[in-house]
Image: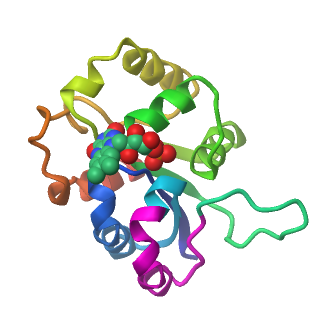
Amino acid sequence: MTRVLYLIACAAGPTQYIDDGVRAAQATGWDVCLILTPSAAAWWEPRMQELVDLTGHPVRSRYKLPWEQDQLPKADAMLVAPMSCTTLNKWGAGIADTLAIGLPSEGVHMGVRVASMPYFNQAQAAQPAVGASIAALRKQGVMVLDGPGGYQPHPPKQGDPKAFPWRQALDRLDA
Ligand SMILES: Cc1cc2nc3c(=O)[nH]c(=O)nc-3n(C[C@H](O)[C@H](O)[C@H](O)COP(=O)(O)O)c2cc1C
């Protein structure tokens, strides 16, 4: 049976190319459901239908209303990538004010495999909250793919969002 991956993307550079991430995951056999933060959804708003067509699922970016049904199949795994500095720090502090944080923050405590790969620059990474948030997520069982073998923060203004290592993140999720 095809496994379901929730690919959860924030408003960080590589999300401009989130279709690359979807295709990379599909190529390794995942049925991909895409969840965007509200900020990331604004980036894709004019082209959202492309993502719906690509995944074959609604693209979700907001919590459902109390009377609405679930629109997506149950997840076998979740990958938060690219994870923004903002989402990392909110999640680390237990703030789940976006569906993009709510799903993995509960999922990891319900037996779902959850990984995240950050994408932000060294100036953002220098905030003391960043290390504390990564430690808080790891303590809960989230695989945070930063540093060697994951994503290393780039110097400010020198990112290469098109080259985000989707395949590496997917391989680590499956390892
Ligand atoms: C064009 C643009 C690119 C951005 N790139 C990044 C990025 O690569 N990493 C990051 O952490 N924040 C980046 N930001 C800032 C985030 O979008 C901002 O912190 C936002 O609140 C993140 O919210 P979200 O995590 O809910 O998507 C960028 C903002 C803009 C306008």
> What residue is shown at x 58% (from left), y 26% (from top)?
140
Instruction: Examine the rendered structure and indicate whether residue 90 appears above or below residue 162.
Output: above
Residue 37 visible somewhere in the drawing:
no
> What residue is shown at x 33% (from left), y 72% (from top)?
19
| Residue reaching furthest to the right | 67
* Magenta span: 42-60
Query: Looking at this view, is 80 or 126 the one in front?
Result: 126
Instruction: Examine the rendered structure and indicate whether residue 123 appears above or below residue 115.
Output: above
> What residue is shown at x 59% (from left), y 43% (from top)?
101
> What residue is shown at x 31% (from left), y 53% (from top)?
171
Instruction: Examine the rendered structure and indicate whether residue 73 appears above or below residue 87.
Output: below
The quarter of the image that holds ligand 1 is top left
Pick the quarter of the image with the N terminus. Answer: bottom right
Q: Please say which color scheme the image uses.
A: rainbow
| Residue reaching furthest to the top | 128
> Could you tell whether 148 is left or right of 3 in the image?
left
| Residue reaching furthest to the bottom | 53
Residue 100 locus on image (x, y percent): 57, 50
Asked whether residue 89 is drawn in magenta, I would say no
Query: Looking at this view, is 95 or 142 the one in front?
Result: 95
Asked whether residue 46 is drawn in magenta, I would say yes
Instruction: Examine the rendered structure and indicate whether residue 87 appears above or below residue 1.
Output: above
Residue 109 locus on image (x, y percent): 69, 36
Residue 117 locus on image (x, y percent): 35, 42
> Could you tell whether 125 is left or right of 11 in the image?
left
Secondary structure character of the magenta stretch overall: helix
The image quarter in which residue 123 lies: top left
Residue 98 visible somewhere in the drawing:
yes
